[in-house]
Image (tube, rainbow, N blue to C red):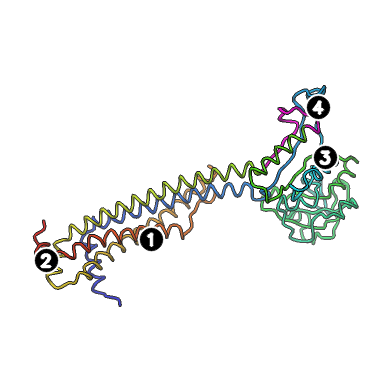
Amino acid sequence: MFDLDLWREIFQSINKNRTRSLLSGFTIAFAILLFTILFGIANGLQNTFKDAFVDDAKNRIAIYTGRTTKAHNGLQAGRRIRLKNEDFDYIEEEYDDKIQFLTARIYRNVQASYKNETNTYDLRAVHPDHQFLEKTLITDGRYINENDLKNKTKVAVIGRLVEEDLFIKTDPIGQYINLSGVQYKVVGVFRDDGGDNEERKIYMPVTTAQMIYGNNDYINEINIGYNPNLDYDQAIGFGSQLRKDLKKRFNVAKDDQRAIRIMNMAEATKSVDGMMVGLGIIILVIGFGTLIAGVVGISNIMIFIVKERTKEIGIRKALGASPKSIVSIILIEAILITAIAGYIGLLIGFGVLKAVSPVLEDYFIKNPGVSNGLVIGATMTLIIAGAIAGYIPAKRASRIKPIIALRTD
């Protein structure tokens, strides 16, 4: 039951000892403030790494080619390495058990027009699996399919912003778009979490592009989605074996770094995960070290408070106050100060993170923040610590005989 006199007495005690109460509150508020800022910055770094790979599959391996930099097996340096359909088929057959998705890429720049609207866009000729490796999200219509590849159909899947640019008041599905003089039927519209640049792209079947743009079987790049059952080390080993086999296939020296290049997301993800684990441990150590400092601080202050109020406790006992009521007053006062100060520290911490967020983004720390649950848990830890720190000396003081308490200096 709510005891108005008890609470009035608690607030009178806090008001009477303002300096003591402020010191107690400052210790708690500062601990929660530091805790909030540290974990907020850590979460900001995690957000940065997540956004960097948001529009690519984590199990992606990309194969690029260039020119040889070293002579090998009687072949001169400077030789251009070009991927073909047969290399795509070789990879598909040789590593079938390690591959989940597989697509080629052909890059072109095209001028697209529909009626009176014209603009220039990047064109990617791909296989159907590209949708999953690029995390392309179809919002209307469909993506490239196997029939498109087999029949070399002139179809296109356009990005959301291409639709906005060219098809202002028209549903693009089923309409024909002119790409550098060739008519293509629009069969799908997509969006991509990678941002505006990704949504200004146009996709078409790789076989169609080979037929129209050069009448050849060259491809610019091969992308693989390795089997997700492979762990990081197995995936990295797969990428290394792939590089080794392709260098052998194209007569490239083992130490030639430019002719055959492999970008393996497993390597990047493993490095990022390792760095985030290390960062998380550092933040936990610092964060909990801050909390421990706060616990020690509030504990020392509560011990001092109880010792300072020994005479007061003696007078209360002499007037008939029970040990339980004495402990309750000190305990509730400790919890109240800790809770209010923790909330203030939480508000200041959130305010600081919000204020410096634009500046932190310049240092690759995106949307720094911390969950309410984590900070509330930290505050509850300090509240419990403050309660325990107040309870033990208060319980001991409540057992002192009034005459002895009144004699205490």
Q: Residues within 10 Å of mark 4 (few under 14, many from 20)?
A: some
- 32 and 96: which is toward the camera: 96
Q: Residue 18's quadrant in the figure?
A: bottom left
Which residue appears farthest toward the bottom when viewing the image?
1
Q: Which residues are magenta?
A: 248-264
**In the image, what residue occupies the spot 78% across and 25% down?**
78
Task: Read off the residue under disc 1.
Answer: 380
Mark 2 belongs to which amino acid?
A: Pro
Residue 349, given in percent of the width and then of the height, sits at: 42, 53
What is the CA distance from the residue labelled 3 to the residue labelled 2? 94 Å
Task: Read off the residue under disc 3.
Answer: 87
Q: Earlier in the sequence, mark 4 or mark 1?
A: 4
Mark 3 belongs to which amino acid?
A: Asp
What is the CA distance from the residue labelled 4 to the residue labelled 2? 99 Å
- Dot label at residue 79: 4
Instruction: Evaluate whether residue 343 shows in this view.
Output: no
